[in-house]
């Protein structure tokens, strides 16, 4: 049975409290809960890329469809806001 570290013993626990709600595969692997290879390998896309928060949000092919869907919503909100502001500017200059 592996020695179970406390949150305070982990790298994120000592430096930042904001990321304690999600443990990446890399973090589990470093703590000895899962196989060592997941320190450098993403378990979802199976690429040789550590599953970091950046990888999940920006790179991982497994989450591409979800990412595109969510980003499309924000892009549409942004476009609507820009169009609205542009319309307001035109009214001001008349
Ligand atoms: Zn991945």
Image (cartoon, rainbow, N blue to C red):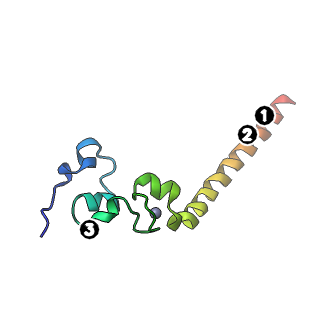
Q: Position of residue 27 (x, y in %)?
A: 29, 57
Secondary structure under tag 3 reads loop
Which residue corresponds to mark 3?
34
Q: Residues within 10 Å of mark 2 (few under 14, many from 20)?
A: few
Residue at 33% in and 63% down: 38
Q: Earlier in the sequence, mark 2 or mark 3?
A: 3
Secondary structure under tag 2 reads helix
In depth, the one of 37 and 70 nearer the eye is 37
Compared with residue 94, is residue 72 higher up or lower down, i.e. above or below?
Answer: below
Q: Which mark is residue 45?
A: none
Q: Which mark is residue 89?
A: 1
Compared with residue 81, is residue 34 higher up or lower down, i.e. above or below?
Answer: below
Label 2 to label 3, Cα distance in Å? Answer: 51 Å
Screen quadrant of the C terminus = top right
Secondary structure under tag 1 reads helix
Residue at 33% in and 47% down: 18
Distance from mark 3 CB to nearest ligand 1 atom below 8 Å: no
Label 2 to label 1, Cα distance in Å? Answer: 6 Å
In depth, the one of 71 and 53 nearer the eye is 53
Which residue corresponds to mark 2?
85
Residue at 12% in and 62% down: 3
Label 3 to label 1, Cα distance in Å? Answer: 56 Å
Mark toward the viewer: 3 or 1: 3
Q: Earlier in the sequence, mark 3 or mark 1?
A: 3
Q: Are marks 3 and 1 in contact (CB under 8 Å)?
A: no
């Amino acid at each position: 049975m592996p020695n179970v570290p406390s949150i305070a013993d982990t790298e994120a626990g000592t430096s930042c409290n904001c990321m304690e709600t999600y443990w990446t595969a890399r973090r589990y692997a470093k703590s000895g809960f899962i196989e060592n290879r997941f320190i450098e390998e993403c378990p979802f896309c199976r690429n040789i890329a550590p599953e970091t928060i950046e990888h999940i949000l920006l790179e991982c092919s497994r989450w591409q469809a979800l990412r595109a869907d969510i980003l499309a919503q924000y892009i549409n909100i942004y476009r609507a806001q820009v169009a609205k502001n542009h319309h307001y500017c035109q009214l001001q200059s008349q």
